[in-house]
Image (spheres, rainbow, N blue to C red):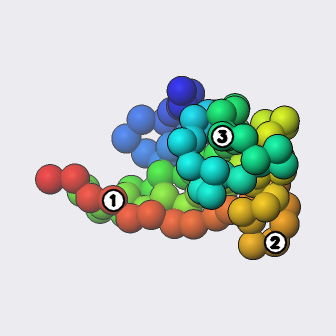
Amino acid sequence: MPITVKVLADKPSLDLTASWSAELSNSKLAFPTKSGAYYRSMHAGMISAGLNIPVHKHVTITPKVIYWYSLGGQSTYTIRTLSWDGQQNHILGGVSVSTKF
């Protein structure tokens, strides 16, 4: 359930988001657990900040930073196992370009 806060209408605006996810998997291979059971757990939380910068009447560029983390329990083991760097918390970043017409 994302929570988004918008500040400054019609000018650059800041999007702040907090959300969480749960996984209910029917595959023991897709989401491994220590016990070998099916993965059914709260999974990850995400906090992000994006700055919407209008560059034209119909175009917006949005740089964004995201902090993504496990919610404990089975999720810590599963995310570490599936992660390339063996960590359960990650900082991500990127830029999107959107258009409206």
Q: Does 60 sit above or below residue 16?
A: below
Between marks 2 and 1 in the image, the one whose residue lies nearer the viewer = 2
| Pointers 1 and 3 in contact (C-beta within 8 Å) | no
Could you tell me how far apart the alpha carbons at marks 2 and 3 are, in whole angstroms?
24 Å
Q: Residue at x 65, y 33 (%)?
A: 40
Left or right of 1: which side holds 20?
right
Q: Secondary structure at mark 2?
A: loop
**What percent of the width, then of the height, locates residue 84?**
75, 72
| Pointers 2 and 3 in contact (C-beta within 8 Å) | no
Q: Residue at x 60, y 56 (%)?
A: 30
Q: Is residue 19 visible?
A: no
Give the labeled residue for mark 1: 98
**What percent of the width, then of the height, locates residue 64?**
59, 57
Q: Does 46 sit above or below residue 90?
A: above
State which tag comes first along the sequence, 2 or 3.
3
Residue type at mark 3: give it. Answer: Tyr
Give the labeled residue for mark 2: 85
Left or right of 95: which side holds 88?
right
The label shown at residue 34 is none
The label shown at residue 38 is 3
Packing grade of label 2 (10 A; few <14, some 14-19, many >=20) is: few
Q: What is the quadrant of the N terminus in the image?
A: top right
Q: Quadrant of residue 74?
A: top right
Q: Secondary structure at mark 1?
A: strand
Packing grade of label 3 (10 A; few <14, some 14-19, many >=20) is: some
